[in-house]
Image: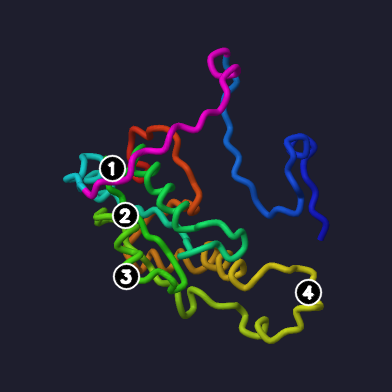
Amino acid sequence: WDRTVHPILAQLGLDPSICCYEIGLHRETAECAAQEAVIPSAPAEFNGTASQGSSAERMHAERGRGVFVILAQNGNHSSYGRDSVALLRRTLRYFYHYYNKRERDDVRICHSGDFDAQTQEAVAAGRREIRFLHLKGDNWKVYPEWLALSNRSAWRSTESDGYRMMIRWYAVRIWPTLHDMGYKWVCRLDDDSLLLSEIPFNLFSF
């Protein structure tokens, strides 16, 4: 099909070949209209000191467990060539600095089997709520199976198998998997997401 972009979004430079965008909205007020977006300096590396939890954490545990999910790769990204582990570590630094050093919500870093034990330990850096989830079996395969054997030269779409499996994970398989793990709420972060300001409440219990 032909994708179209709303004229206002087209003025912002959005490309119809991109499947999705994350757009931040703000209210135009005299105070904020003249301010430029500024990315704070990166927080210091985590020192491995764990907190004892918070009242908000206990509250969200009572009302239903929540989890932050990040799909990551160990090494250079297969599509973009960037250092995915370095970006993941930066994402976690900001996330903990502005939110999770206080709330201590569970974090599940999902991968296709490329994170060895040593790398997992280095990324977690003593933060016990960070755990790794190896996606395999029905959670990480080309579906339906006959697609893997089809004539791809005839396809209009050129997305890789990895991209297709990622979409299937987030659209279909994540829900029963996390439900079976006891979670009620889920928040997705990418390995290059940046939380840039304090969140003064628990996202799963406010």
**Residue 106 has which mark?**
2
Does 148 sit above or below residue 190? below
Amino acid under disc 2: Asp
Residue 206 in view:
no
Task: Identify the residue shown where x is 45% and y is 35%.
Answer: 196
> Where is residue 22, by image quadrant?
top right
Measure the C-alpha gap from mark 3 to mark 4: 38 Å
- Residue range (magenta): 30-48
Q: Which residue is mark 4?
A: 155
Instruction: Estimate how packed mark 1 is, as few (under 14), some (14 to 19) or many (20 or more) residues with alpha carbons within 10 Å.
Output: some
Q: Earlier in the sequence, mark 3 or mark 2?
A: 2
Q: Are marks 1 and 3 in contact (CB under 8 Å)?
A: no
Amino acid under disc 4: Trp
Q: Earlier in the sequence, mark 4 or mark 2?
A: 2
Amino acid under disc 1: Lys
Q: Which residue is mark 3?
A: 117
Instruction: Estimate how packed mark 2 is, as few (under 14), some (14 to 19) or many (20 or more) residues with alpha carbons within 10 Å.
Output: some
Task: Identify the residue shown where x is 58% and y is 66%.
Answer: 78
Instruction: Tell me the SS state at disc 2.
Output: strand
Front label number (3 vs 4):
3
Of residues 144 and 120, the one nearer the viewer is 120
